[in-house]
Image (spheres, rainbow, N blue to C red):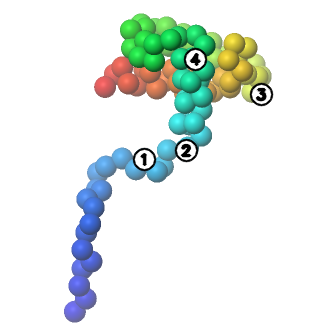
Amino acid sequence: MTETPAIYKQTAGKPRVSLVPPALVEEVAKVRTWAVATKYTDPEGWRIVPPQDYADAIGRHFFAYLRDHDSVDAESGLSHLAHIATNCAFLLEMTR
């Protein structure tokens, strides 16, 4: 008779964070670091911005990306996709 191995950690139904591409987290961190250091001094100030402002920013960065996939944001020097991801993260957090 074979024994069932002991279960050390209950993970069923929990999000598999290891499936998130590290580049996503790194790029959002770059945008946030730049923004707090140069443009917005309060790291939590994003919470009081109207959601529509983030939706508009997503659109602007998306269209800039579509015009030129290799272009970067003129102000930050970071990719438009990184800015899109950051704004999406804010909207996701606001809906929790």
Residue at x-position 28% and y-position 56%: 12
Sequence-first tag of 4 and 1: 1
Q: From the image, tell me which residue sits under label 1.
A: 17
Q: From the image, tell me which residue sits under label 4.
A: 37
Q: Amino acid at mark 3?
A: Asp
Q: Residues within 10 Å of mark 4 (few under 14, many from 20)?
A: few
User: Which label was assigned to residue 45?
Assistant: none
Sequence-first tag of 3 and 1: 1
Residue 51 higher or lower than 92, as above or below: above
Q: Amino acid at mark 1?
A: Val
The quarter of the picture where the N terminus appears is: bottom left
Sequence-first tag of 3 and 2: 2
- Residue 51 visible in image: no
**How many angstroms separate mark 1 from mark 2 (CA)?**
9 Å
The quadrant where residue 81 appears: top right
Q: Residues within 10 Å of mark 3 (few under 14, many from 20)?
A: few
The quarter of the picture where the C terminus appears is: top left
The quadrant where residue 4 appears: bottom left
Viewer-nearest of discs 4 and 1: 4
Where does residue 88 sit, x and y in percent of width and height?
A: 49, 24
Q: Amino acid at mark 4?
A: Ala
Where does residue 26 sit, x and y in percent of width and height?
A: 57, 36
Q: Are marks 2 and 4 in contact (CB under 8 Å)?
A: no
Quick check: 66 left or right of 46? right
Viewer-nearest of discs 2 and 4: 4
Q: From the image, tell me which residue sits under label 2.
A: 21
Residue 17 higher or lower than 78, as above or below: below
Residue at x-position 36% and y-position 20%: 94
Residue at x-position 25% and y-position 59%: 10
User: Which label was assigned to residue 70?
Assistant: 3
**How many angstroms separate mark 3 from mark 1 (CA)?**
28 Å
Q: Are marks 4 and 3 in contact (CB under 8 Å)?
A: no
